[in-house]
Image (cartoon, rainbow, N blue to C red):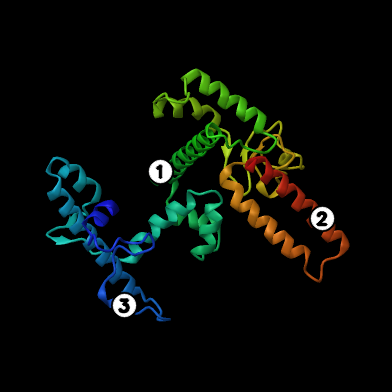
Amino acid sequence: MQDYLHNSADRTEAPRDDEPLFKPALIRGVGNVQLTAHQSTVYLNYFAKECRRLAEEMAAAAPAEADRILALYHIPDEGDKPWRWRTRQLRRTLAWYIASQPFGVIAGMIQYGHASAMMFEGYAGTSQSGFRSEIEEERRLAQLSDIVEMYEDWKAGINPGGPMRSKLVAEFTSIRSKIGDLPGTVVDDRRRAKMLSNTAVTLHPGYINDCFFYADHALCLKVKGAEVQPAFTRCQPARCPNSVVARRHVLALQSCIADAETMKNSKNISPIQKHAIEAQIVIYRQLLEQVER
């Protein structure tokens, strides 16, 4: 739809990447005016109206694809009138997506102001509604997406880092030889995904590293009473055999290094604390170098 918009725009002035596609006249001035719930509803319905118009124009321009275009982009009517959007209709959808992310239940509990994680889970969807099974399916798809991204990075010469690196590269090498995924060849995406899915089963995404969780090797479980599941708060990414660092962790590691450097140079840091911070910076840099080289 965005390509269609750009192609339909005045050719004398190409749109910028940061230029908004939809801008009603009543938001000419932004300033410091607080956005009210009513204004949000107005903008939301304006956006929906534009989407509807564009979908109809695209369908008219490509009759052969009209049914598919309308199925994807056309917003159905409510009876004989256009659907009236309200921001609160999206709260539960947003809650569902937040809850499906790593640590999302806790983040959603804070964002929505709920007193407990259980209340937020209930708001996002109950077990009777199939919420938990849907979350597991989303988590499985996210795991597969992450492992495919790592595999494609490895093919492009960007090796993963961390103690799990050698084992993961050996797995990638084996998969590549089995499916014949060599330069110049076309490999079926579904077959590649199926081959990688077994590796993705134990993958748990993290902020500065991922965990291919095997309980027997997990250092985070070397604590009395620990549950048999990854505990990123106790993770030792440079030492745990389950740890791997990918290209998508680079920005997070760089941010951690910058924060640690700032903390190290603050006035109220004792020599012992400074030494501990410096040791952590060394670990972050080692992980970063393994991915960047």
Q: Which residue is pictured at 20% across the width and 46% down the height?
A: 69
Q: Which residue is pictured at 63% across the width and 35% down the height?
A: 213
Where disc 3 sits, the SS reads: loop
Q: Residues within 10 Å of mark 1 (few under 14, many from 20)?
A: few
Looking at the rendering, in which quadrant would you find the C terminus?
A: top right
Sequence-wise, which precedes: disc 2 or disc 3? 3
Where disc 2 sits, the SS reads: helix
Distance of mark 2 from mark 3, alpha carbons?
Answer: 52 Å
Q: Quadrant of residue 39?
A: bottom left
Pointer 2 with pointer 3, Cβ within 8 A? no
| Foreground residue among 100 and 264 | 264
Q: Which residue is mark 3?
A: 28
User: Would residue 31 be found to the left or right of residue 222 on screen?
Assistant: left
Residue type, mark 3 in image: Arg
Above/below status of 278 relative to 36: above
Q: How many marks?
A: 3
Judged by depth in the image, the label closer to the viewer, 2 or 1, is 2
Distance of mark 2 from mark 1, alpha carbons?
Answer: 46 Å
Distance of mark 1 from mark 3, alpha carbons?
Answer: 44 Å
Q: Which residue is mark 2?
A: 276
Residue 83 drawn at (x, y percent): 21, 61
Residue type, mark 1 in image: Gly
User: Would residue 18 be found to the left or right of residue 227 on screen?
Assistant: left
Above/below status of 160 relative to 13: above
Q: Residues within 10 Å of mark 3 (few under 14, many from 20)?
A: few
Sequence-wise, which precedes: disc 2 or disc 1? 1
Residue type, mark 2 in image: Ala
Q: Which residue is pictured at 29% across the width and 54% down the height?
A: 2
Q: Which residue is pictured at 66% across the width and 47% down the height?
A: 232
Q: Which residue is mark 1?
A: 130
Residue 282 drawn at (x, y percent): 76, 49
